[in-house]
Image (cartoon, grey):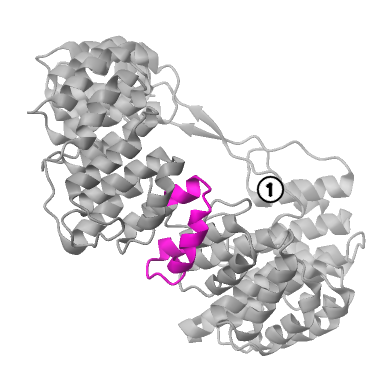
């Protein structure tokens, strides 16, 4: 094969000029068509400190100490370039195609020195007698090199080539802002015999080019009743990118074409749904005060795609109308709309918003719950803090298991110390292990001295319950999951004991050091970290001997967990164990950027007062096509 999977996707034909879809199929397609630029987000929000996998827990043992995050330096083996230069001179197309593919892959990997191949690649494209696949392969290589000096060659190949070449060259020429391509794209947009895929590519390219001469042609495409819906949507997006005026007028005209009598009444199976989508998209793009009222009506549409687009427009304009539309979306079957409602409540920032967000803490979709939790945590830092505390306490008492867990996390994040008795009841008596985990995280963040004896008693009981669970071949899926949940609770509590240097917890923590102790790896790593914090500056010979054994355990069939080895190295450094310097130095390697090596480096610096140099690791990229002979 000459082209990679990604290349094939870029050249995938879309031959049908119109889509004859109805009912649910049309609704799904509209969501896909609109979602690229305007639809509601399908995942967690982009709030400060929020990642797509953020469960709201956090682990201070991975942040204390703060080890550098090293990446191997990228190096390149360019010795094959001489063979590639000779291969491009061969008469057979297959060899030259494979060479072009190697150049494409190397350019994407950032290999230097590929500019020397530009004359040969340009000559291949200019040779009209060359195989079409070979010419496309050469064009792929030039585009991957991102060399705009060949823009004229690509434009000529684009104008005289097939639709494969058009899709490839249009994006590159638009990215390079090659103004000479404007007449070609305008001709394709207005042409009656142009393939719909080529027209779509030209419409998108005009938006990226940024030349306002294209506004008239794009407006005609957007208003063309018989044009492909995807092309019309792309025309609207390009008009918005060009900061064109009159978007609200386009919306009104499209609504007239659709024959819609009342805004917001379009159903999934209506024939007018496509034009309604175009109209709402135009309203969103205009974002003028006069269009916000229309968007507020569309936000109540029974069509989830239209409602999502309208809410996105209102939120982007920071309009108070989004807050007025949000209560009707609070229990909407579509989770994306519920998430948008939560965002509107956050923008509104009043007491009713706090009540609504507390309701969403128990949503069945986790990214909605996570957004509600972060929104409440944000509101709780200001004047609404008392109201948020009341809502959290109410959810801890009467909410479902999903809501109680999120409420406990909010209580810990906002340091609601007055809820410690309620959280302690949840930790001891709640039927859900996941809710108990949320309470354990809250206590780790609260760090209340008065709760430590009760938390130690709970940790001892939990460790005993975890030790009684079957392991190895006798374990069932349920028992393994239960051990994982109990281990997560113990991990949070152990990190609390370590952060507060709670010495009475040391006997319990010592039981988790042996490799085959019946506890999860997460709990064992946290126990070792806590022991290092508790024994800071105390060279405990017996403890140091055990930790050295964990760090040095690299048995072939049953090695120690990396997390335990990392925490063992850090604990030895905190204890100031000079007897461990030999083993720490043996695992500190100049070319190893792993976290184990970095932990050993930190420990050596902590003990000796002199930090070793950072590891200098590198990864060599070498394309395996025609490697040099030794």
Residue in the image at 64% along x and 64% along y: 376
Q: Secondary structure at mark 1?
A: helix
Residue drawn where x is 34% and y is 32% of the image:
246
Magenta stretch, main secondary structure, is helix
Q: Which corner quadrant holds the C terminus? A: top left
Tell me the quarter of the picture where residue 420 sits: bottom right
Q: Indicate left or right for 303 with 15 as reference.
A: right
Q: How many marks?
A: 1
User: Is 51 inside the magenta-drawn segment?
Assistant: no
Nearer to the camera, 308 or 428: 308
Q: x, y (%) of residue 312?
A: 43, 50
In-front residue for pair 530/346:
346
- Residue drawn at the location 75% of the way across and 36% of the way down: 613
Where residue 14 appears, as percent x and y from the top left, is 15, 41
Q: Which residue is farthest left?
A: 193
| 257 or 224: nearer the viewer | 257
Choose between 353 and 31: the one closer to the eye. Answer: 353
Asked whether the viewer can see residue 619, the reply is yes
Vertical side of 382 occupied by 194: above or below: above
Indicate whether residue 330 is drawn in magenta.
yes
Q: Mark 1 — residue?
A: 597
Magenta-drawn segment = 312-339
Which corner quadrant of the image does residue 282 belong to? top left
Q: Quadrant of the N terminus?
A: top left
Residue 170 % position (x, y): 26, 25
Relative horizontal placement of residue 176, taking residue 369 as reference (left or right):
left
Q: Residues within 10 Å of mark 1 (few under 14, many from 20)?
A: many
Residue at (25, 37) in percent of width and height: 10
Where is residue 305 shown, x and y percent of the image? Answer: 32, 56
* 170 in relation to 263, above or below: above
């Amino acid at each position: 094969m000459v082209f990679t999977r990604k290349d094939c996707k870029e050249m995938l034909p879309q031959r049908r000029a119109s889509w004859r879809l109805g009912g649910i199929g049309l609704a799904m397609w509209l969501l896909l068509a609109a979602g690229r630029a305007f639809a509601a987000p399908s995942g967690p929000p982009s709030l400060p400190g929020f990642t797509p996998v953020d469960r709201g827990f956090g682990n201070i043992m991975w942040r204390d100490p703060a080890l550098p995050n090293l990446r191997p330096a990228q190096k390149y083996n360019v010795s094959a370039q001489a063979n590639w230069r000779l291969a491009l001179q061969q008469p057979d197309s297959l060899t030259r195609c494979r060479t072009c593919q190697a150049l494409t892959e190397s350019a994407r990997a950032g290999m230097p020195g590929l500019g020397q191949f530009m004359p040969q690649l340009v000559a291949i494209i200019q040779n009209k007698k060359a195989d079409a696949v070979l010419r496309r392969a050469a064009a792929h290589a030039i585009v991957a090199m991102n060399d705009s000096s060949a823009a004229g060659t690509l434009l000529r190949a684009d104008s005289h080539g097939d639709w494969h070449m058009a899709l490839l060259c249009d994006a590159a020429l638009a990215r390079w802002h090659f103004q000479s391509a404007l007449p070609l794209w305008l001709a394709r947009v207005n042409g009656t015999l142009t393939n719909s895929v080529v027209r779509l590519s030209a419409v998108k390219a005009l938006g990226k080019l940024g030349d306002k001469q294209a506004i008239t042609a794009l407006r005609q495409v957007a208003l063309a009743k018989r044009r492909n819906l995807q092309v019309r949507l792309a025309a609207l997006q390009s008009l918005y990118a060009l900061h064109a005026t009159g978007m609200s007028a386009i919306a009104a005209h499209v609504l007239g074409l659709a024959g819609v009598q009342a805004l917001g009444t379009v159903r999934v199976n209506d024939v007018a749904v496509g034009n309604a989508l175009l109209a709402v998209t135009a309203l969103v793009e205009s974002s003028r005060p006069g269009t916000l009222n229309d968007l507020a009506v569309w936000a109540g549409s029974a069509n989830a795609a239209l409602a999502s687009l309208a809410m996105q427009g209102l939120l982007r304009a920071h309009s108070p109308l989004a807050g007025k539309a949000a209560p009707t979306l609070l229990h909407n079957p579509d989770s994306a709309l519920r998430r948008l409602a939560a965002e509107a409540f956050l923008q509104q920032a009043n007491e009713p918003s706090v009540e609504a967000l507390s309701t969403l803490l128990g949503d069945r979709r986790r990214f909605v719950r996570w957004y509600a939790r972060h929104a409440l945590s944000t509101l709780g830092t200001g004047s609404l803090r008392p109201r948020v505390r009341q809502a959290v306490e109410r959810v801890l008492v009467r909410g479902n298991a999903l809501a109680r867990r999120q409420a406990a996390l909010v209580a810990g994040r906002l340091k609601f110390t007055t809820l410690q008795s309620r959280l302690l009841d949840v930790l001891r008596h709640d039927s859900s292990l996941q809710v108990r985990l949320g309470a354990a995280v809250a206590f780790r963040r609260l760090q209340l001295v008065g709760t430590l004896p009760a938390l130690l008693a709970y940790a001892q009981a939990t460790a005993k319950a975890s030790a009684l669970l079957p392991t190895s071949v006798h374990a069932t899926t349920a028992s393994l999951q239960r051990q994982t949940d109990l281990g997560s609770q113990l991990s949070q509590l152990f990190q609390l004991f370590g952060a507060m240097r709670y010495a009475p917890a040391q006997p319990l923590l010592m039981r988790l050091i042996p490799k085959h102790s019946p506890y999860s790896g997460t709990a064992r790593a946290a126990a070792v970290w806590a022991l290092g914090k508790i024994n800071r500056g105390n060279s405990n010979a017996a403890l140091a001997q055990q930790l050295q054994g964990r760090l040095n355990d690299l048995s072939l069939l049953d090695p120690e967990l990396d997390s335990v080895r990392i925490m063992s190295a850090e604990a030895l450094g905190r204890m100031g164990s000079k007897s461990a310097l030999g083993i720490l130095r043996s695992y500190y390697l100049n070319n190893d950027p792993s976290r184990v090596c970095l932990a050993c480096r930190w420990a050596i610096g902590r003990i000796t007062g002199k930090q070793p140099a950072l590891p200098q690791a590198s990864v060599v990229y070498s394309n395996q096509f025609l490697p040099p002979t030794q």
